Image (spheres, rainbow, N blue to C red):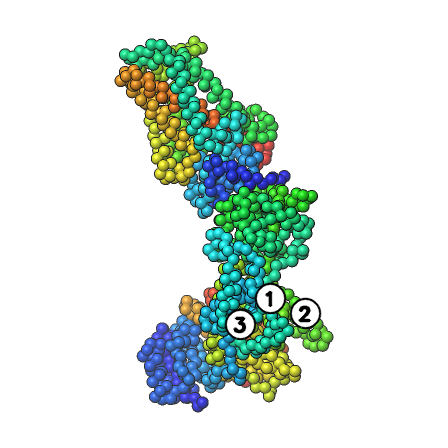
């Protein structure tokens, strides 16, 4: 088998944040020091080499970018300053763009301008929709969001958004599975996939592998952001709008912060506070890190990294403001803040989840799961991967 | 000179703890009948030296024996003008390496003192050699390339007149065809400097330049070289003091390369040398149609490090390809440039150029045997990428550049050993037992030397001596190779070489003018003298001299040229008639030293072992063992030799017939990685020793009694075991039956 060298990939990868990979002299210190690199799936050197040689087919098949959590040990120990950790990050961005069949992700990554314009347009559309579709006589005496935007309407909009998101993310994830598995996809019997399914859930929920990295603070921060985000996503996107209501399974006890104000120790409220704290702590830690460039993984920030953190933090902050608006019972302030909150949150969900950084929440556990599936398959075949 | 001898014994450094000083003094005054014998607790102090100097001026002492530390230390303290000085090493090799207060230790010290007394009897003050002709201080530089020009400029800066000979009509050498260079600080490619050098040389009036010229004859030796130069049919004669050989290199012939590299299959497969011709004005274009290059591959080690072609690394081709890759990138930043390498080697600081190339996006592929495929219009390279573990293909290449290696200018022409062997066969004489050096008729110097017309090669036809230990030395005294003729190298190293070689040449001229030897016995004022009336014309000295210092006349009489001599004494060891001697080093002198050793009777059970040790390494290693307070056998008596090559077989016969039980020769490692300061000395000693069995047979003695061991200075820790083990062997063989004869 032979492969053709494509020197143009390096130029392309620059848009995905690749900077110093050309400095690599292939000594392999990075692979040696990485606590996660295994003989059957060695990285980062292999991927750096693929990048230098422009071996796109091999990159598409590689699970390694998703096996890396970017603790930065490799970059710290690189004798040439080739920043292998950042190369792995660029690979994940590149793969995200390649998994995306719409081509939108690619444009998103290739141009910061495009990214900002896309977010602005979605934000404006949301604002416009809220303006056009608000109810005729809002309650100006009490902060009562249902009087401006009735819950069923919001729920329908939420469901439409949710469906689109799910379709995009799932189809992209399916492409991820196809690329990663290649011919093996159909060769491996279903039982093996099922037997390893718990890996998918465990890694989705705990990012256990991240804990094996030397710098465990990164794992903690990541876990805070992830759990905070997931909690609030479930509360707001799933339960508030609760398709539940639309299909006639409405239960007030499950609604999240519309107009009912729960007592302080209500589990919903406590969960909300946890999520708020977790996200704020995590994103602030990461933002300060990126501003100060105080750790290898924070040294190089792609436009999408900033956008992700900023949107997440803004969403949380506006969410807090809405919460206080309601508690203080300031109607107009609450309505405006709610509009802004949605203008930030919706673009974040619509654009980041299927097309950018957020997508890794699906790709990473899926690829780890597939790696386990492959291992199991080879084990049963009596082969060594 | 009438000798008045005095013995001075130092009692410091633990010597008086180990030895009975009084008894030692008594030996000097009574047995040796020395008029003055004094001891001092610290002889190397000012007070101690004053004591000696007072006796020199007051008592007329002119022959001084100092029983103290090794002669390898304090030599400048115990340096007394117009006096014969000998040192008895009772510190490192007696007090520090033997049991203190022991009878055997005392006997050893006494023997060493007896040996010194016998030695100074035979020693004379050296008289420096002055040739009859007037000596020249000019330097001849052979070759007007980058190295030659730099050498000429550096010599002129030091105030030395230079004669520069270049075979081409213009100065500049290979660098004349080069546009951009890779040189310090290697941050980027640079403009060529050759024109500045040419201008500087042409403008300097103490540099005489001959272009389009050839050296037809070089006779004489350092200080008195007579050089005949032919230019445009006219002949010029110059007298020079020393020579810098900067004759340069030739590229390896690409037509000899393996077919897989595709040379000749397409006009677009060229060599790195041809590349320079294709990038005039900094524009690189495809040879076949002058198209601007977009895809180009450089294949490293095109023949280098391959036993079928050039077995050595040419050291400069990696940096050259990096430079050429950058030239392509400068012209067209979007060009795809590949460098396929076995191991990328960037000596010195050239690694920065590699970084630069990486930055510019040059792609590096590690592969041991790339293949060039030429089919119709598609030029491609297939390479097994070792890091990828797969074959990669580079397609649609505009150009493939083969990085060929360097061959020194000395590698061309017939090897005279072949001629000599032929002659010997024709004459049907006894087989030559001394291996001949590779000397090719490369027509660079045309030396009028008996051993051959050019410099002998060390390895791969490079005429170096030993570039780690003795940089710029060749095996012809006063001739210093520099630049790519010495070893393959780049511009920075060549300039360094030129400067270093000029410095060597100046040193040589200065020392020679004083009658002193050059490296490695720099400053030695003695030289070999031949008692010609006893010469049998056996040619051993003229053949064996490692430096070709001895010519011969038609009747095969040796014609020594002392300014070429390095004073190793190999000729002295070779001469079966023992007619060669130095003022302070001769066959009878060592013979008397051996005879001075007291050999106890058989029933005393004190065998004696003579150790002939090379003073450059083995003797130093013995000192080191003492320095580390390592104890070794007390039966040994060590005689330092200038070089083991100066060992004369008669000494072994003398020792054995005197009753000494064994002889151990300690020399340097020889062969490919030799460590001998005189290149051939220990090897020649070993060859000579193969004849010792005749002597042993004649005396009806066991062959185990004589042994040859190679040691280097770092082997000092092995030495006690070697000595003890040999002593054990001798003990097993039993006492020498000649004792008491």
Secondary structure found at label 3: strand
Q: Quadrant of the N terminus of chain B?
A: bottom left
Say which mark, if any, is on residue B169. 1
The Cα–Cα distance between marks 2 and 1, rounded to whole angstroms, is 33 Å
Q: Is residue B75 above or below residue A102?
A: below
**Residue for point 51% across, 64% down:** B199
Say which mark, if any, is on residue A334. none
Secondary structure found at label 1: loop
Q: Can residue B643 be seen in this view?
A: no
Disc nearer the start of the sequence (3/2): 3
- Which chain letter matches label 2? B
- Which residue in the protein does label 3 denote? B208
Other residues around mark 3 within 10 Å, as few (<14) / some (14–19) / many (≥20):
some
- Which residue in the protein does label 2 denote? B418
Q: Foreground: A243 or A90?
A: A90
Secondary structure found at label 2: helix
- Which chain letter matches label 1? B
Q: Residue A293 placed where, x, y %?
A: 37, 39
| B582 left or right of B81 in image | right
Q: Is residue B163 above or below residue B489?
A: below
Question: Does the CB distance between marks 3 and 1 fall below 8 Å?
Answer: no
Which quadrant of the structure image shows residue B390?
Answer: top right
Quick check: do tags 2 and 1 share a chain?
yes
The Cα–Cα distance between marks 3 and 1, rounded to whole angstroms, is 15 Å
């Amino acid at each position: 088998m032979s492969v053709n060298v494509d020197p143009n990939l390096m130029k392309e990868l620059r848009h995905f944040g690749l900077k110093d990979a050309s400095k690599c002299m292939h000594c392999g210190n990075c692979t040696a020091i990485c606590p996660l690199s295994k003989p059957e799936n060695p990285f980062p050197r292999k991927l750096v080499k693929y990048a230098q040689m422009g071996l796109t087919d091999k990159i598409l098949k590689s699970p390694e970018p998703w096996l890396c959590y970017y603790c930065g040990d490799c970059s710290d120990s690189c004798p040439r300053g080739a920043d292998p950790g950042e190369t792995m990050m660029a690979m994940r961005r590149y793969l995200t763009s390649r998994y995306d069949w719409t081509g939108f992700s690619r444009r998103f990554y290739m141009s910061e301008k495009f990214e900002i314009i896309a977010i602005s347009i979605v934000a404006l559309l949301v604002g416009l929709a809220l303006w056009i579709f608000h109810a005729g006589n809002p309650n100006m005496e009490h902060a009562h969001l249902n009087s401006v935007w009735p819950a069923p309407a919001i729920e329908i909009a939420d469901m439409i958004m949710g469906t689109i998101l799910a379709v995009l993310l799932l189809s992209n994830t399916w492409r991820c599975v196809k690329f990663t598995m290649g011919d093996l996809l159909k060769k491996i019997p279903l039982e093996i996939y099922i037997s390893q399914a718990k890996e998918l859930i465990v890694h989705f929920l705990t990012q256990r592998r991240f804990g094996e990295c030397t710098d465990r603070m990164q794992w903690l921060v990541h876990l805070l952001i992830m759990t905070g985000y997931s909690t609030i996503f479930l509360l707001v996107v799933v339960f508030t709008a609760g398709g539940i209501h639309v299909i006639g399974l409405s239960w007030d006890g499950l609604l999240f912060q519309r107009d009912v104000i729960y007592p302080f120790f209500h589990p919903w409220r406590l969960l909300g506070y946890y999520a708020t704290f977790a996200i704020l702590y995590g994103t602030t830690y990461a933002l300060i890190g990126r501003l100060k460039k105080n750790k290898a993984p924070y040294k190089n920030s792609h436009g999408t990294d900033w956008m992700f953190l900023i949107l997440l933090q803004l969403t949380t902050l506006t969410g807090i403001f809405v919460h206080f608006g309601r508690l203080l019972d300031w109607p107009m302030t609450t309505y405006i803040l709610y509009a802004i909150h949605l203008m930030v949150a919706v673009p974040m969900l619509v654009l980041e989840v299927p097309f950018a950084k957020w997508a890794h929440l699906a790709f990473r556990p899926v690829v780890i799961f597939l790696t386990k599936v492959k291992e199991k398959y080879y084990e049963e075949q009596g082969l060594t991967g | 000179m009438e000798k008045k001898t005095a013995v001075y014994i130092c009692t410091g450094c633990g010597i008086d703890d180990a030895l009975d000083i009084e008894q030692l003094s008594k030996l000097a005054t009574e047995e040796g009948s020395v008029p003055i014998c004094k001891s001092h607790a610290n002889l190397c102090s000012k007070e101690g030296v004053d004591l000696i100097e007072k006796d020199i001026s007051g008592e007329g002492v002119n022959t001084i024996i100092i029983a103290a530390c090794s002669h390898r230390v304090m030599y400048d303290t115990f340096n007394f003008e117009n006096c014969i000085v000998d040192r008895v090493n009772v510190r490192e090799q007696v007090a520090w390496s033997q049991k203190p207060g022991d009878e055997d230790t005392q006997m050893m010290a006494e023997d060493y003192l007896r040996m010194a007394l016998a030695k100074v009897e035979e020693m004379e003050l050296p008289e420096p050699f002055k040739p009859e002709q007037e000596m020249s201080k000019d330097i001849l530089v052979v070759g007007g390339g980058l190295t030659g020009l730099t050498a000429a400029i550096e010599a002129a800066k030091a105030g030395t007149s230079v004669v520069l000979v270049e075979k081409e009509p213009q100065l500049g050498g290979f660098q004349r065809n080069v546009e951009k260079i890779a040189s310090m600080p290697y941050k980027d490619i640079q403009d060529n400097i050759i024109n500045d050098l040419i201008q500087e040389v042409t403008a300097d009036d103490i540099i005489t330049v001959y272009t389009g010229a050839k050296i037809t004859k070089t006779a004489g030796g350092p200080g008195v070289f007579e050089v005949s130069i032919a230019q445009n049919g006219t002949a010029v004669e110059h007298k020079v003091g020393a020579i810098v050989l900067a004759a340069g290199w030739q590229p390896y012939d690409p037509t000899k390369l393996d077919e897989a590299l595709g040379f000749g299959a397409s006009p677009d497969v060229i060599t790195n040398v041809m590349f320079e011709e294709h990038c005039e004005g900094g524009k690189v274009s495809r040879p076949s149609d002058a198209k601007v290059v977009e895809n180009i591959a450089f294949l490293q080690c095109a023949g280098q490090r391959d036993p079928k072609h050039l077995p050595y690394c040419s050291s400069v081709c990696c940096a050259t390809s990096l430079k050429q890759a950058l030239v392509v990138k400068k012209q067209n930043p979007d060009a795809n440039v590949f460098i396929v390498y076995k191991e990328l080697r960037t000596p010195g600081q050239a690694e920065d150029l590699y970084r630069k190339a990486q930055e510019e996006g040059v792609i590096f592929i590690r592969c041991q045997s790339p293949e060039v495929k030429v089919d119709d219009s598609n030029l491609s390279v297939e390479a097994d990428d070792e890091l990828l573990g797969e074959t990669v293909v580079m397609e649609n290449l505009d150009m493939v550049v083969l990085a060929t290696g360097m061959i020194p200018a000395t590698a061309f022409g017939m090897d005279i050993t072949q001629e000599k062997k032929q002659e010997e066969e024709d004459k049907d004489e006894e087989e030559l037992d001394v291996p001949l050096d590779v000397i090719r008729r490369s027509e660079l110097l045309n030396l009028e030397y008996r051993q051959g017309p050019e410099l002998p090669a060390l390895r791969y036809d490079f005429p170096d001596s030993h570039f780690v230990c003795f940089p710029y030395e060749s095996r012809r005294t006063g001739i210093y190779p520099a630049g790519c003729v010495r070893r393959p190298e780049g511009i920075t190293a060549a300039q360094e070489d030129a400067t270093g070689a000029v410095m060597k040449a100046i040193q040589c001229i200065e020392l020679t003018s004083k009658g002193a030897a050059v490296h490695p016995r720099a400053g030695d004022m003695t030289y070999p003298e031949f008692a010609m009336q006893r010469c049998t014309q056996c040619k051993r000295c003229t053949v064996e001299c490692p430096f070709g210092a001895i010519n011969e006349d038609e009747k095969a009489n040796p014609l020594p040229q002392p300014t070429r001599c390095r004073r190793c004494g190999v000729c002295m060891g070779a001469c079966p008639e023992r007619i060669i001697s130095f003022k302070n080093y001769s066959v009878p002198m060592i013979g008397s030293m051996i005879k001075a050793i007291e050999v106890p009777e058989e029933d005393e059970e004190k065998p004696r072992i003579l150790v002939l040790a090379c003073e450059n390494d083995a003797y130093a290693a013995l000192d080191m063992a003492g320095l580390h307070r390592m104890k070794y056998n007390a039966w040994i008596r060590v005689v330092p030799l200038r070089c083991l090559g100066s060992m004369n077989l008669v000494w072994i016969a003398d020792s054995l017939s005197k009753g000494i039980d064994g002889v151990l020769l300690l020399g340097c490692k020889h062969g490919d990685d030799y460590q001998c300061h005189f290149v051939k000395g220990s090897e020649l000693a070993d060859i000579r020793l193969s004849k010792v069995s005749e002597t042993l047979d004649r005396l009806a003695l066991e062959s185990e009694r004589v042994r040859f061991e190679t040691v280097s200075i770092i082997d000092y820790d092995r030495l006690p075991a070697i000595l003890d083990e040999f002593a054990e062997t001798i003990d097993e063989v039993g006492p020498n039956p000649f004792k008491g004869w």
